[in-house]
């Protein structure tokens, strides 16, 4: 029988994979995709909690998270395009303007 | 039923790992494609959790809209394969250590939690009818606020995409 802790374990591992992506990769697109992985890990945990505690609120929260994530991706990609137009790069190591 | 959980969980984790670190290709398009697979297998997990509406929304919004937006921008900017650059070895080791510690803390705390063991009788069905009723009764205000968020995002994107930010 698959219980709550199995889903939560999958969610925790997926979250860690997303954090690895944000920390390690230099390509801004991959970093944005890793952020999506992190959000999805949170979504999975919330749907699992919602199912196992017989409460619809968790699923409503996931619904709103998906909406906000879509807006976040759109704004993030617009920022990336504006950045690329100005600097011709999508790598974090080339963006060192604010480095002391 | 258990076999499906293991299948979808393994697919989610393997494809998620291939999004972040693909040994065969450094192209962002490959990562986006594996992100689609991750999202789809996650929708399978949602179905196993009886969250049918959210599974459909996941496929439509993420796989259908968000990833297409990613691919569109990647191909518009014509980014080639990520050239392999020198990584700071000490920093790589440190970040793996930190994230490994984080994963260990998360997984071990799940195993020890008493509340997790107590919740073991799943009955909830996340059907469209239930979510729709909740959305238009208890969640009317967040629903309206989210529409304002989307409007603000749209205005912001138009402003950011203008050629001269004046």
Image: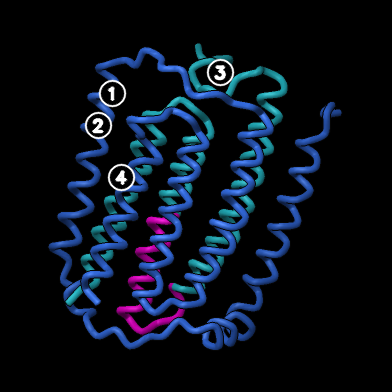
Chain colours: A cyan, B blue
At which x and y percent is residue B141?
Answer: 65, 74
State if disc 4 and disc 3 touch (CB < 8 Å): no
Magenta region, main secondary structure:
helix
Instruction: Give coordinates of residue B21: x percent, y percent.
Output: 35, 34
Instruction: Please tell me whether residue B79 belongs to the stretch shown in magenta.
Output: no
Residue with the mark numbered 4: A16
Chain for numbered disc 1: B
Residue shown at 43% from the left, 53% from the top? B37
Q: What residue is disc 3 on? A: A95
Q: Residues within 10 Å of mark 1 (few under 14, many from 20)?
A: some
Q: Decide: is B152 above or below A22.
A: below
Badge 1 vs badge 2, beta-carbon distance below 8 Å = yes
- Identify the residue at the far front of this view: B24
For this view, does B49 lie left or right of residue A28?
A: left
Q: CA distance from mark 1 to mark 2?
A: 6 Å
**Circle 1 is placed at which residue position?**
B92
Residue B96: which numbered mark, if any?
2
CB under 8 Å between discs 4 and 1: no
For mark 2, give the secondary structure. helix
Q: Chain of mark 4?
A: A
Gap between marks 4 and 2, in whole Å? Answer: 10 Å
């Amino acid at each position: 029988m698959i219980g709550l802790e199995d889903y939560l374990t999958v969610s925790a591992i997926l979250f860690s994979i997303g954090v690895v992506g944000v920390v390690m990769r230099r390509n801004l697109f991959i970093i944005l995709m890793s952020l999506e992985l992190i959000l999805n890990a949170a979504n999975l945990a919330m749907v699992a909690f919602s199912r196992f505690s017989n409460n619809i609120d968790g699923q409503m929260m996931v619904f709103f998270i998906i909406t906000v994530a879509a807006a976040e991706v759109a704004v993030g990609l617009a920022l990336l395009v504006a950045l690329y137009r100005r600097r011709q790069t999508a790598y974090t190591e080339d963006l060192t303007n604010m480095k002391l | 039923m258990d076999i499906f959980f293991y299948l979808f969980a393994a697919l989610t984790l393997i494809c998620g790992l291939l999004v972040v670190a693909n040994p065969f290709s450094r192209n962002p398009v490959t990562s986006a494609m594996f992100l689609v697979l991750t999202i789809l297998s996650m929708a399978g997990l949602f179905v196993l959790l009886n969250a049918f509406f959210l599974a459909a929304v996941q496929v439509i919004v993420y796989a259908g809209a968000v990833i297409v937006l990613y691919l569109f921008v990647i191909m518009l900017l014509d980014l080639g394969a990520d050239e392999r650059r020198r990584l700071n070895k000490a920093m790589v080791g440190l970040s793996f250590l930190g994230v490994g510690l984080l994963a260990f803390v998360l997984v071990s705390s799940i195993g020890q939690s008493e509340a997790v063991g107590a919740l073991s009788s799943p009955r909830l069905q996340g059907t469209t009818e239930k979510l729709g009723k909740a959305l238009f009764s208890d969640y009317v205000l967040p629903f309206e606020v989210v529409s304002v968020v989307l409007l603000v995002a749209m205005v912001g994107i138009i402003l950011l995409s203008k050629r001269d930010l004046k």
